[in-house]
Amino acid sequence: MKTILILGVSTALSACANAPDLPTQNMLAPAARAYVETRAASFPDVLAGYTSRPVKGPEDWRALNRQQSSAAGEGH
């Protein structure tokens, strides 16, 4: 009974309140304005510099690292 009374009173009071004003055009997002230009997005090539390497059986991992290293000749 108390819950119904609390909900009823709060609903009745909120129904009597004034609705808030709608946002003006200046407050809206710039994309919604017709005079604002947008830039085309450029995306980098995700496969640039990719080197295909075939699948092989297990080998010495240190030798494989030396072969695939961009700084050949460095290391042990």
Image (tube, helix red, strand yellow):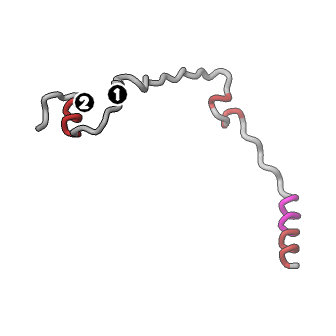
Q: Verify whether residue 6 appears in magenta.
A: no
Q: Residues within 10 Å of mark 2 (few under 14, many from 20)?
A: few
Instruction: State how far apart marks 2 and 1 are (Cα).
Output: 12 Å
65 left or right, relative to 35? left
Residue range corresponding to the magenta coloring: 9-15
> What amino acid type is highlighted by mark number 2?
Gln
- Whole-percent x and y of residue 54? 34, 28
Tell me the quarter of the image containing the N terminus. bottom right
Kind of element beneath mark 1: loop
Q: Nearer the viewer, residue 25 or 60?
A: 60
Q: Verify whether residue 10 appears in magenta.
A: yes
- Which residue is at a point 33% across and 27% down the rendered structure image? 53
Q: Which mark is residue 54?
A: 1
- Whole-percent x and y of residue 65? 22, 35
Is the residue 6 above or below the residue 12 in the image?
A: below
Q: Residues within 10 Å of mark 1 (few under 14, many from 20)?
A: few
The outermost residue toward the left is: 76
Is the residue 20 above or below the residue 9 in the image?
A: above
Tag 2 near tag 1, CB within 8 Å: no
Residue that label 2 marks:
68
Q: Earlier in the sequence, mark 2 or mark 1?
A: 1
Kind of element beneath mark 2: helix
> What amino acid type is highlighted by mark number 1?
Pro
75 left or right, relative to 20? left
- Which residue is at a point 11% across and 38% down the rendered structure image? 76
- Which residue is at a point 68% across and 22% down the rendered structure image? 34
Q: Quadrant of residue 29?
A: top right
Q: Nearer the viewer, residue 42 or 30?
A: 42
- Whole-percent x and y of residue 63? 19, 35
Q: Quadrant of residue 27?
A: top right
- Whole-percent x and y of residue 4? 87, 73
- Which residue is at a point 62% across and 30% down the rendered structure image? 30
